Amino acid sequence: MRTIPVEDFDLVIFGATGDLARRKILPALFRRFCAGQMSPGARVIGAAKTCHDAESFRAVAADAIREQSSDRCCDEAALGRFLACLDYVPLDALGETGWSDLAGHLDPGHVRAFYFSVRPMLFAELARRIRDHDLVTPGTRIVVEKPFGRDLHSARDLNAMLASNFAERQIYRIDHYLGKETVQNLMVVRFANMLFEPLWNSQYVDHIQITVAESEGIGSRADYYNRAGAMRDMIQNHLMQLLCLTAMEPPARFSPDTLRDEKLKVIHALDPVLPHHIVRGQYEAMPGREADHPSYRQAVGDPRSTTETYIALRVHVSNWRWAGTPFYLRTGKRLVARSSVISVVFKDAPHAIFGQEGGRHINVLTIRLQPNEGITLQVTIKDPGPGGMRLVDVPLDMTFAEALGPEGEHPPDAYERLVMDVIRGDQTLFMRGDEVEAAWAWTDPIIAGWEARGDVPKPYETGSTGPRDAELLLARDNREWRGIRP
């Protein structure tokens, strides 16, 4: 795999001892270091209220990297060289402590990136203090993690606050789903293959399903999740991005603004969602294993919570390409397996020449985002042997691990790609401010509607595929969900 090193940079991670930094950011940087993409002059500076020094922070980083490298060999010599690139500054985001020390650690000739791996309530203070302490250079970027607000009003406030301190070209709103190799391959499959693009419309596509299923519960995110729910946590950002990439028109060129312009057009083309096209669910405890797998209400300590842990929607994109073709979105926690899949289900052949023996068969293009990343095209062939034309569906399968060899077995983590894109100054896979606001403008009325109606989520069993009403959502249209498989 060809790796192009990035230029020298200083990456400041606010919240460097937090969960996201330890699980994702630091391990991603280490893997890019091992791949030769980090230049010798690159430095990573942790900044947090925790009273660490450089050595103790390096020890925290080393433990985190070893833990996240359990499925592959961790080169201790390389780890030692990487840790030498790390430094640490105790810093108070809400006070003045540590800011002058941080300024002294930064090289004016380097690309300068500030990663906000902290609670959203701190975004405004961090942005203002970076500006007030003269830490902004022409090569400065900030990276903002979701949630980008909790509704349209708060998203606008957040965008205005960021814009008062930084130009839009300096703001990187990160959605890690866009960094997944298979998500990027979705664009390549569509726009680099003449085979698919002529068929990618309502004339040939019956419907599209986008599923992001999680087998885990809410874990340690009870406080946040009970205020957000699946709609705010997943649909408004992750599934919205997958929908946009699936439905958008070909951009004139592969560049940040042309790509994001086309995604924005999709959001503007979304119809309001009708109440009977919405299914909300909430997981129950696993019978006999309540201690290990409690119900959602037990997990959050709120016996009356009406927060959804599952949601399914029938969505319509009202434009020339997709008129009349439904998009079915679903996501949930405590489901039967962890699986993120986009399924493009094509229409039946216009005339069934093989009669009843042929049966009903469909072509499906399946893009597996996780796990077992790959692309499968289901086609219909004759079942070998005598006795008539018996037809069967078989997959043309391109599993990355099998098709690409060792390089496909461990595709780069999304954060590896995205953090390096920040350093390169490439915003293609990041959300623009108007895109975030448009997504909230579509999402808010859906939430306001069920709150006004007093809708209560339907219970569903832990380890199932979700509430029964979700099956009926498609059954009313003479369709059915694709299976959720690990």
Image (cartoon, grey):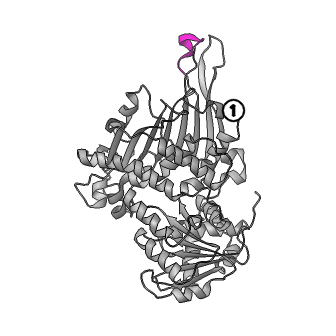
Residue segment shown in magenta: 352-360
191 lies left or right of 278 = right
231 lies left or right of 260 = left
Identified at 44% across, 65% down, the residue is: 158
Q: Nearer the viewer, residue 106 or 268?
A: 268
Residue 402 visible in image: yes
Whole-percent x and y of residue 151?
Answer: 38, 57
What residue is pinned by disc 1? 195
Whether the magenta-drawn stretch holds residue 58 is answered as no
Whole-percent x and y of residue 50?
Answer: 46, 82
Q: Residues within 10 Å of mark 1 (few under 14, many from 20)?
A: few
The image quadrant of residue 141 is bottom right
Q: Is residue 157 above or below residue 122?
A: above
Kind of residue sitting beneath label 1: Leu
- The image shows a total of numbered marks equal to 1
Whether the magenta-drawn stretch holds residue 357 is answered as yes
